[in-house]
Image (spheres, rainbow, N blue to C red):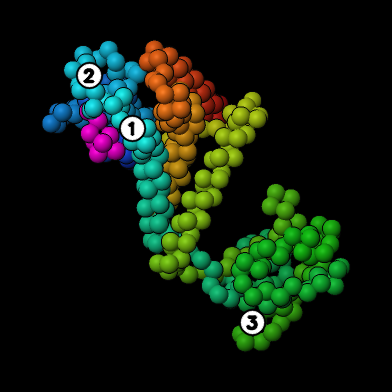
Amino acid sequence: MQNVINVLVFMLVLGSIIAIHEFGHFIAAKYFDVYCSHFSIGFGPRLFSKKGKETEYEIRALPIGGFVSMAGEADQEEVEEMKDVPLERTLKGKKTYQKVIIFLAGVFMNFVLAVIVLFASNLMAGQVPVDRVQIDAVENQTPAAQYGLKANDIIEKIYVKDSKKTILIDSYETFSSSLTKENFGTTDDHPLVTVQVKRENESKNIDMKLQFNEQTQNYYFGIVFKTRRMSFIESITYTVTDVKEMSTSIVDALRLLVVNFASTVKQLSGPAGIYQVTAQVTETGQIASIFRLVGLLSINIGIFNLLPIPGLDGCQVLFAVVERIIGKELPQKLKLILQMVGLGLVLLLMFFVTYQDLMRIFG
């Protein structure tokens, strides 16, 4: 039963991201009166189809993409239905800024979706540290447990014996940012420190020997701090931060893919990898975690579509700008060939990362 739920959530997650992206293109095209013959979520065999006033609405079997068929696109030139569409209702008959808005509307809607679900996640389940640096729990077999830190202790200062440096702790941010060798003023991986805590309204000094975590490049205590629910305003602030950090992360990954393709491509995931992550998140039973996953994937897909690869939105914008500069349309056959090559490369990349995912899962 859980596997069925995992598959349904996976399809709902990918389907919602694709639907909102294509809806962006569709609603912008409709606003500028571009004729749209098909609005499709997914590729492959049709599972559902309904004819509107002039648009065929479809759901297809493979939820790995979608499309809006607009009059004037390179791949619609030979479609019989499109041949009688007046010029003013085609992309060719629209001004450059209108075409750019239509091409970028999908990416815009991906970011709108991300903002909505990340804000909902933060508002529903977002946690921030309390104003005081108060311990909520001590992890087993850690320096904090070994040397006697306890739940409800409030950390006030850290004295580093090697450097004779005292670090005043007035917030979680101060504590977390202070745990570096530079701030401790030492190169020792196991420095001796004295931690002053307030316990039951009394100050108490605890001598400790810390451990340096090579992965995080911080000294490690092994404590969990008390938190509280985010306020409405904090949810907005953290949502902005989330969008910024997620966007930066995918941009960095794409940059590395260009400068170091062989190494970076091994770290990418395709539909199988996304399914595995979705299943893990689904099994936690936390709606807020699913919302965060939707937000992350929506930003990734949005930014990926900005790449100037034929077949993606970024290249469509590039074509429109180039045509405006040179004062004439690029040959439709050239755009169609480039589009097919670009989509072929994207599909090859998808097949490769899917193979990697399957090897990780079953290998």
Instruction: First in sequence, mark 2 or 3: give its number.
Output: 2
Residue tagged 3: 199
**Horizontal and vertical percent position of residue 131:** 55, 75
Figure check: 355 above or below 281: above
- Residue at (47%, 56%) from the top-left corner? 240
Residue tagged 2: 82
* Residue 154 lies in quadrant: bottom right
- Residue at (54%, 40%) from the top-left corner? 250
Stretch in magenta:
28-36
Figure check: 302 above or below 321: below
Q: CA distance from mark 2 to mark 3?
A: 77 Å
| In front of the other: 350 or 154 | 350
**Horizontal and vertical percent position of residue 51:** 14, 28
Residue tagged 1: 95
Instruction: First in sequence, mark 1 or 3: give its number.
Output: 1
Q: Secondary structure at mark 2?
A: helix
Frontmost of labels 1 and 3 is 1
How many numbered circles does the render carry? Answer: 3
Frontmost of labels 2 and 1 is 1
Within the magenta stretch, is there residue 47?
A: no
Which amino acid, by three-letter code, is at mark 2? Answer: Met
Q: Are marks 1 and 3 in contact (CB under 8 Å)?
A: no
**Horizontal and vertical percent position of residue 214:** 74, 50
Work out which quarter of the rendered image holds the N terminus and state it.
top left
Figure check: 315 above or below 209: above
Q: Secondary structure at mark 1?
A: loop
List the single residue furthest toward the front.
327
**Horizontal and vertical percent position of residue 183:** 77, 64
Examine the rendering and report whether any part of residue 106 can be seen. no
Which amino acid, by three-letter code, is at mark 3? Answer: Arg
